[in-house]
Image (spheres, rainbow, N blue to C red):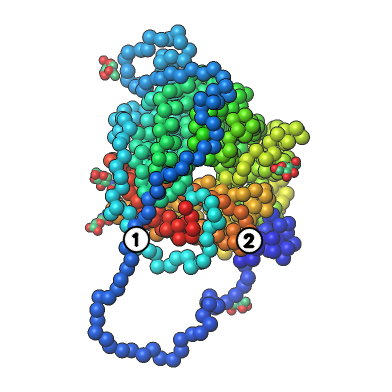
Amino acid sequence: MVKANVLGQLFGLTSVVVGQQVYLAANGSTPRPQCTKCTEGEPQYTFTPFEYSMTSTVRYATSRPSPTTTTTYAAPLESLTSLIGSVSYTTWGKWDPTANATATDAANPYGNAAWTELWRIANPPNFTQEATSSVFSTTVKPTPVPTEELVLPPRDYFGPTDCYNFPPGFEFGVASSASQIEGATAEEGKAPSLMDILIQDDRPKDYVTNENYYYYKQDIERVAAMGVKYFSFSIPWTRILPFALPGTPINQQAIQHYDDVINYIIEKGMAPEVTLLHFDTPLQFYGTIHNVTAVLSNSEIGSTNGGYQNETFPDAYLNYAKIVMAHYADRVPVWYTFNEPLLYSANGKAIDHVIKSHARVSHFYREELKGTGKIALKFNDNFGVPRDPKSEADVYAADHFNSFQLGPFCNPIFLGQDYPESYKMTIPDYVPLSQQDLEYINGTADFLGIDPYTATVIAPPEPGSIDSIKECASNSSAELRPYCVNQTTTDIFGWNIGYRSQSYVYITPTYLRLYLNYLHNTFRTPIVLTEFGFPVFGEADKQNLSDQLFDSPRSVYYLSFMSEVLKAIWEDGVQVIGAFAWSFADNWEFGDYNQHFGIQTVNRTTQERNYKKSFFDLVDFMKARGVD
Ligand SMILES: *[C@@H]1O[C@H](CO)[C@@H](O)[C@H](O)[C@H]1NC(C)=O
Ligand SMILES: *[C@@H]1O[C@H](CO)[C@@H](O)[C@H](O)[C@H]1NC(C)=O
Ligand SMILES: *[C@@H]1O[C@H](CO)[C@@H](O)[C@H](O)[C@H]1NC(C)=O
Ligand SMILES: *[C@@H]1O[C@H](CO)[C@@H](O)[C@H](O)[C@H]1NC(C)=O
Ligand SMILES: *[C@@H]1O[C@H](CO)[C@@H](O)[C@H](O)[C@H]1NC(C)=O
Ligand SMILES: *[C@@H]1O[C@H](CO)[C@@H](O)[C@H](O)[C@H]1NC(C)=O
Ligand SMILES: *[C@@H]1O[C@H](CO)[C@@H](O)[C@H](O)[C@H]1NC(C)=O
Ligand SMILES: *[C@@H]1O[C@H](CO)[C@@H](O)[C@H](O)[C@H]1NC(C)=O
Ligand SMILES: *[C@@H]1O[C@H](CO)[C@@H](O)[C@H](O)[C@H]1NC(C)=O
Ligand SMILES: *[C@@H]1O[C@H](CO)[C@@H](O)[C@H](O)[C@H]1NC(C)=O
């Protein structure tokens, strides 16, 4: 593969919109240029005494060493209290929808009665499951991982043969999100969030998930035992501030909980990375919900209405962020303000609120709190590649697709530039950015976090017609909105673009390398793969644990993706500074457990975790190439 910008010059395209693949016609079998000398003539057959002489190496994963030094990234809470004004702390209990006793503090706007009322209004579907299925109701004491569990599995026969290393300081970690793992949904004062009502159809709504809220020490213990350094997780706003808004009391138990989570990660020799908002918007921003389905689906941009457009959102988000940062910034090296904000942005105002809220938090962190860690966002875009890179219309379509998803955020944040045309032509109610806005927003992220799970093949709605994209963009009832392109998963010959998973993810490593070139050359900032992972097709249907654990397709995914990251770094000059596997264990994937994205299994009856082969393979790949 040649460098992206060379491809661009070859085909007369601009350097940022080079194509997916250019197909060069050839017949016959694959050439073997590495075979400079071939064996010729007849093989010589011989007899020898037979012996069982095969040997193999038994290797063990190496656990994180205990920390010997403490790094701080901000002053401790005691020195920062003036930044969050006068705050109060309190506690609430656990919601039991069948309880007969009513709270007696109805006069207190933030008392137990008011808290219970939040749950009653939210009325989460089938909530009683919560009471019956949990294994744990208090924090579980961790048990060290026995050495026998840390033996590396047999390798896949075909594997990487490169000699590249990762540059010093490359951050390798695992990622997760609260609503997908925590459980304890209505316990220790947590108020309802969007995630508690999101599923309203006939998919099961499970409030138990992985019970990580009580099992976090074991989860951390097991990741540290494998030698992974970075542990990325999200904190739910509705645990910290059940009443969401500025001036409302802080949940003492939640503050204590995440204090313990962060301290335990550090104690185990790892580093915590925190996402402030991962889809779990407090329900307060929706007003009183009468028709949940209508509220959630009311979005002209993202798949879900995340409530960001509410006028009270920006100040409330900043207040929440300040409180969390004041408590934990001394120990947290990396902060993410929003996870995949486009997917939960309902309209132009929502996007405006996201970028300005991010900028305000970033300015607060750097200038007032004087944090020395990093701050960024996690973006979604499964790289759009032109169906035929020699077709001007397909290239235009792919660029439209990619710039629409990234540009509304990344243009102002990384370049100090206005929104892309793809966005402005589609969303007429977008909020214009002034020169002053751009100056305030520009440079407020230290790197670009991307979740590049897979690639998507893109063409205009009508083959060959750029106009058909523009017509769709200006037609508020057009079928293919908001991206106004035809998305498929096959190449121009009809083959799938890669090995298919249980979801939208296909194994597309070479497109990842092209994508990293696109991001680097377009936004000119360091890149972190903040999430990437592969739900092996049919894995949930495998009855035997040992079959689930031998997950070769997932190993192929991770090793091939990381191999292409190395090529992007060393052969293309693309700055990639970290990668986070999604996720450290199978979890709740917004409506089911059938998409196994984990590098560990979770037994849904006992909550027991087991390492999959891919976890060992990925860690071994990284460590063999110099990663701490
Ligand atoms: C490949 O074979 C086909 C069918 O025989 C032929 O038409 C074509 O010209 C060949 N292509 C090349 C590049 O040799
Ligand atoms: C509330 O009262 C009903 C009817 O007496 C009873 O069945 C139920 O168990 C009670 N709930 C609790 C939590 O005690
Ligand atoms: C609620 O429970 C019923 C019965 O178990 C089930 O059929 C339905 O799918 C569940 N609905 C949700 C949204 O979980
Ligand atoms: C916006 O959020 C506030 C809470 O801060 C709520 O009172 C109001 O109803 C919400 N507005 C809408 C339109 O949902
Ligand atoms: C709720 O809204 C949805 C989507 O707009 C609609 O299909 C449904 O009929 C509404 N339900 C009620 C009870 O009004
Ligand atoms: C945005 O900030 C970067 C430095 O962070 C600077 O190089 C660039 O010129 C700024 N862009 C604009 C349009 O001011
Ligand atoms: C807009 O899209 C709708 C739905 O596809 C279609 O019926 C209508 O004709 C389009 N309007 C225009 C002006 O193209
Ligand atoms: C997208 O393109 C494919 C391949 O040309 C075609 O089969 C499909 O019908 C198109 N989809 C839409 C929605 O236009
Ligand atoms: C599970 O594995 C055992 C032992 O290898 C085998 O006997 C059994 O048939 C397997 N079960 C299934 C459902 O594949
Ligand atoms: C989960 O654990 C239960 C109880 O030990 C066991 O019966 C079951 O086979 C386990 N499930 C899997 C998929 O291993």
Q: Residues under labels 2 and 1: Cα distance?
A: 34 Å
Residue 520 position in % (x across, y down): 64, 52
Q: Which residue is drawn at 49% across and 85% down?
A: 38
Look at the image and tell me whether residue 460 can be seen: no
431 is higher (above) or lower (below) than 615:
above
| Disc 1 target residue | 59
- Nearest to viewer (mark 2 / mark 1): 1
Apparent side of residue 122 relative to residue 101 in the rendered image (left or right): right
116 is higher (above) or lower (below) than 526:
above
Residue 312 position in % (x across, y down): 60, 23
Which residue occupies the foreground of this view, 212 or 14?
212
Q: Which residue is drawn at 60% across and 33% down?
A: 370
Which residue occupies the foreground of this view, 619 or 533?
619
Dot 1, how many residues are within 10 Å of its Cα: few (below 14), some (14-19), or many (20+)? few
Dot 2, how many residues are within 10 Å of its Cα: few (below 14), some (14-19), or many (20+)? some
> Which is more N-terminal, label 1 or label 2?
1
459 is higher (above) or lower (below) than 116:
below
Quadrant assignment, res 571 = bottom right
| Disc 2 target residue | 572
Q: Which residue lies furthest to the front in this view?
A: 68
Q: Residue at x 30, y 45 (%)?
A: 144
Residue 624 position in % (x across, y down): 45, 60
What is the secondary structure assignment of the residue under circle 2? helix
Q: What residue type is labelled 1?
A: Arg
